[in-house]
Image: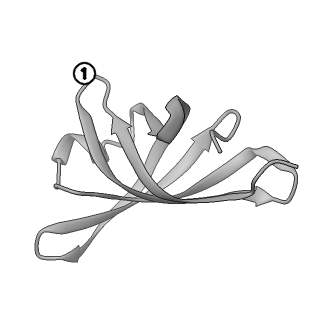
Amino acid sequence: MPMTTYSGTATLILTDGARVAGMASLGTNRRGDLNGWGGTFRPDESNPEAGDPSQVLQLELPYDEIGAVVVTSVRKVLATQVLMSLTGRGPAPF
């Protein structure tokens, strides 16, 4: 049975190919439906280009599993950290 959650390291790949390392917490929206997924991503370093909601980005998990995501919101959690809300596109990479 496929996993319905993932929490751990991830890399957000921007449209220009830049890679932003961080931590992701992801889950499927409905049990058993791997096409409805999303969660949050906390980059290790803030990158203003990573929060553009008009772009479809790639989220890479360990073992080269990659899923398409859209950033739906970005909020500051500390002076130097942000938390991004993501919505997955297509099959979940976990």
The image quadrant of residue 77 is bottom left
Q: Residue 12: x percent and y percent? A: 36, 40
**Amino acid bearing label 1:** Asp
Residue 56's spot in the image, x, y percent?
45, 31
Residue at x 25% of width, y 21% of height: 16
Residue at the far front: name it: 63
Residue at far top of view: 16
Residue 4 location (% of width, % of height): 74, 57
Quadrant where the image shows the C terminus: top right
Mark 1 nearby-residue class (10 Å; few <14, some 14–19, many ≥20): few
Q: Is residue 69 visible?
A: no
The residue at 82%/59% (across/down) is: 30
Residue 65's place in the image compared with 23, above or below, is: above
Q: Residue at point 73% right, 48% down?
A: 36
Q: Residue furthest left?
A: 79
Image height check: is 13 above or below 47? above
Position of residue 4 in the picture relative to residue 41 (left or right): right
In the structure shown, which secondary structural element does the residue marked by tag 1 occupy? loop
Residue receiving disc 1: 16
Is residue 87 visible to the viewer in this orientation of the structure? yes
48 and 27: which one is in front?
27
Q: How many marks?
A: 1
Q: How is the image coloured?
A: one colour
